[in-house]
Every structure is written in C-alpha cells, then in structure tokens.
Image (cartoon, rainbow, N blue to C red):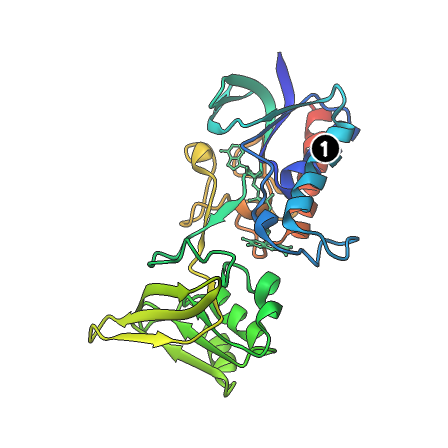
Amino acid sequence: MIYDVTIIGGGPAGVAAGVYAARKQLKTLFITKDWNSQSTVSEGIENWIGTIKISGADFAKSLEGHLRAYAKDFVDIHTSESAEKIEKIDGGFKITTSKGSYESKTVLLTAGSFRKKLEAKGADIFEHKGLTYCASCDGPLFAGQDVVVIGGGIAAFESASQLLAYCKSVTLINRTDKFRADPVTIEAVSKNPHFKIVTNAISKEVKGEKFVNGYIYTDSKTGKDTELAVAAIFVEIGSVPTTYFAKDLVKMTEYNQIIVDPKTQRASVDGVWAAGDCTDGLYHQNNIAAGDAVKALEDIYLFLKAK
Ligand SMILES: Cc1cc2nc3c(=O)[nH]c(=O)nc-3n(C[C@H](O)[C@H](O)[C@H](O)COP(=O)(O)OP(=O)(O)OC[C@H]3O[C@@H](n4cnc5c(N)ncnc54)[C@H](O)[C@@H]3O)c2cc1C
C-alpha cells in the first residue's frame, strides 16, 4: 500500500495539514513523536486566532482532538513514533521510523524545532519558574521588574525591545563582543535608558528559591563573577530544526532549516513539502506554521491530482 501523503510532526503545522488532508480524502499517514508542540509549555497562548487565551497543554489537546475528529478512514495516525530517514524511491518516498517503514507518493515535513538550552547551573531547575524561552509569551508576567536576556542575535534584541516596554530594566548578556543582530536594531534598542549590554559574559548560575531571583555570569576576559538580582531570564541563543531525517534528501540552510518556496512550501525535491519551524521561513509562530502547512497541503492536492 502506498499513501498519497505522509505528514511528519504533530504540532500546529502537521495537524492543520492533517485536517485538510482528511477533508480532501487523501490517503494519509500521520506520524508524530507526540502532540507536544513547542508552545505546549506556555502558561497561556494569547495569539492563536479565534481563541482569546488557551494554556499550552489545552492547545496540544485541542490540536489532537481536531485531527482525530476528522481523520475517519483517511488519516492513519501513528503516535509515539519518530521519523528516522526519508529516501526517494520509484514513484515516491520510503519513510523509515522507529517502528517500521512506509511508502508514500508525497511527504510534508512539519517536525518543528527545539530551543537550544542554556547551559548553566540551575538552568534546568528554574525552567518555567522565571527562566523562559519566549519573551512574547511570558514577558508581561515580569512587568516592572529587572530581567536579563541571554543572546546576541536578532531574537535576543527583539525580545529585549519587547520587554523594555514594561520591564524596569533589561540587561542583555552576550558570550562575545560581537553581535549577530543588525546594527540598526542594536542601535535602536540601545537608545533606551533602561537597557544595558554586558559582553564577554559566560552564564554560570541561575539562582532562586521557588522562582528565579538571581543570575551569575563570568567575565571571560578577567574570570571575575558578577551576580545580578533579576526576576527573569529570557534565553534567546537559537533553535535547532528537527530535520535530521531529511538531511540527504532536500536542500537546507547552514542552520539545517529546509529551504522552501514561500508560495507553495515546496522543498528542493519534487514530492517533498515542509512547513512551520523546520523551514527557512522568516517568522515562526503557531498561526504561521498552521497557515503554511495548509498552503502546502493545497499544493500537494493539486500535485497528486495532476499525476
Ligand atoms: C516556549 C515557547 C512558547 C511559544 N509561544 C508561542 C505563542 O504564544 N504564540 C505563537 O504563535 N507561537 C509561540 N511559540 C512558537 C510556536 O510554538 C512555534 O512557531 C510552533 O510550535 C511551530 O509549529 P510546528 O508545527 O512547526 O512545530 P512544533 O510545534 O515544534 O511541532 C513539531 C512536532 O513534530 C514532532 N516531531 C519532532 N520530531 C519528530 C520526528 N522525528 N518524527 C515525528 N514527529 C516528530 C513533535 O513531537 C511535535 O509534535 C512559542 C515557542 C516556544 C518555544
């Protein structure tokens, strides 16, 4: 048996595509490691359009429920299963997973990405207790307080800029004295009198009791430790796309993001599409992941019908 389409990943991108595939009555294989999309950890998602506020956990449940409600005989849902390798074969693709192998005429890659974790003493203990990976989600909880942002790229400066709208002060901590953000953004953020930059600073320890109350860094030039009293630490040191299973299949950026045509979400090989955080799309959000996956599924449908 050969599937029309195989969707890999059960976040907003994969589920949106799955719902559309069911409605188009495509014989679909849906493989996901779990239903925990990245924002599942969020206390409250306030920008999922049509929903004023939803906890990350309920968001994950509603995605799963939506797909199961329409899957019927069209979408075979395989959970607790991970894609391991995808190869081109005659007439389609062979998908090897942790549980078996399958054949499919087309594939849609939506396995998202995961944030690079801060390596410092206490970072794991205080995750979601003041140490967070999303300024737009958790920032407002720390209004009027002193916070740090760790990172030196555009995401770090943009997070700092958002936080400066309501935090008492924002200190940006960077490992080197070079920044990956563009000079215009750096200059604009640096004009704010409540913003400070510390360079050549290596994160040493996250301190706290129930919640974060301090952060220690080591100056890499002098070896001197400095402790800052802060209520929150926003980590923006990059993310890693989950694309390892397609590394020999499609073209990727130097950061292993799948390169797609933004009009159709087609990847570099005929029959492969990608959407969401695993792609080289400029913006990564739930609504964008879902929308781009719908775009991909529409294009897959036309591709299959044209065959
Ligand atoms: C802490 C945090 C909070 C956020 N809050 C918001 C917010 O409030 N609003 C917003 O719009 N955006 C938010 N974002 C961004 C948003 O979560 C992402 O843009 C979105 O999750 C991307 O969706 P996706 O479907 O591409 O991938 P993901 O959400 O990463 O989902 C990937 C899916 O693929 C599965 N998977 C992974 N590897 C494999 C494999 N090998 N085989 C099979 N399945 C696999 C995973 O189990 C998961 O189900 C937040 C991000 C973070 C990190």
- Image coordinates of residue 43 in percent, x first then y, are 62, 55
- Judging from the image, what secondary structure is the residue with disc 1 in? helix
Is 172 above or below relative to 24? below
* Residue at 39 percent of width and 65 percent of height: 207
Is 126 above or below relative to 102? below
Query: Which quadrant, please, contains the C terminus?
Result: top right
* Residue at 66 percent of width and 39 percent of height: 296
Q: Is residue 97 left or right of residue 295?
A: left
Is 267 above or below relative to 51? above
* Residue at 59 percent of width and 46 percent of height: 276
Tell which residue pokes out farthest to the top in this image. 1
Q: Is mark 1 within 8 Å of ligand 1?
A: no
Residue at numbered disc 1: 67
The amino acid on which the numbered mark 1 sits, given as a three-letter code, is: Leu
- Image coordinates of residue 166 in percent, x first then y, are 60, 78
Q: Is residue 232 left or right of residue 61?
A: left
Q: Nearer the viewer, residue 169 or 282?
A: 169
- Image coordinates of residue 81 in percent, x first then y, are 52, 26
- Image coordinates of residue 31 in percent, x first then y, are 58, 28
Q: Nearer the viewer, residue 64 or 49?
A: 64
Is 273 above or below relative to 282? above
Query: Which quadrant, please, contains the N terminus?
Result: top right
Tell which residue pokes out farthest to the front in this image. 209
Quarter location, residue 18 = top right
Q: How many marks?
A: 1
Q: Is residue 122 visible?
A: yes
Q: Is residue 299 visible?
A: no
* Residue at 65 percent of width and 42 percent of height: 60
Q: Residues within 10 Å of mark 1 (few under 14, many from 20)?
A: many
Tell which residue pokes out farthest to the bottom in this image. 193
